[in-house]
Amino acid sequence: MSSAKSNQIIPLSKWEEHFDYPTVSQLRWYNFQNTSDFNRCVVRLGGRLYIDTTRFWEWVESNYEK
């Protein structure tokens, strides 16, 4: 699995094939709760959820800075 930041859109169900963190269930929870405006990372196409990795890592950095 890769932890490198790359510019791609990944189906939510395939997230764990590309990244170790966070889990699919955590991503679904963030989306359901719209935690810290998480929905800006989500792309909805044909009833499926995709994660824009560039926006996701920007979201992580902006919400979890030390």
Image (cartoon, rainbow, N blue to C red):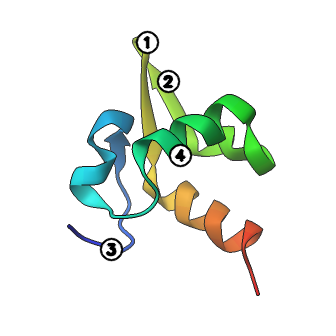
Identify residue type, mark 3. Answer: Ser
Q: Which mark is residue 44?
A: 2
- In the displayed structure, does residue 6 sit left or right of residue 58? left
Number of residues whose C-alpha sits closer than 10 Å to that of mark 3, classed few (under 14), some (14–19) or many (20 or more): few
Q: Which mark is residue 66?
A: none
Q: Secondary structure at mark 1?
A: loop
Identify residue type, mark 4. Answer: Gln
- Does label 4 or label 1 sit earlier along the sequence? 4
- Does label 2 or label 3 sit earlier along the sequence? 3
Instruction: Report how many numbered discs are placed on residues in the image.
Output: 4
Number of residues whose C-alpha sits closer than 10 Å to that of mark 2, classed few (under 14), some (14–19) or many (20 or more): few
- Distance from disc 1 to disc 2, alpha carbons, whole Å, reads 6 Å
Q: Which of the 4 image quadrants contains residue 24?
A: top left
Q: Which residue occupies the foreground of this view, 53 or 22?
A: 22
| Residue projecting furthest to the bottom | 66
Question: Residue at horizontal 55%, vertical 37%?
Answer: 42
Q: Which residue occupies the foreground of this view, 33 or 60?
A: 33
- Distance from disc 1 to disc 3, alpha carbons, whole Å, reads 27 Å
Give the labeled residue for mark 4: 26
Q: Secondary structure at mark 2?
A: strand
In the image, residue 15 lies at what x, y percent? 33, 47
Q: Quadrant of the C terminus?
A: bottom right
Q: Secondary structure at mark 4?
A: helix
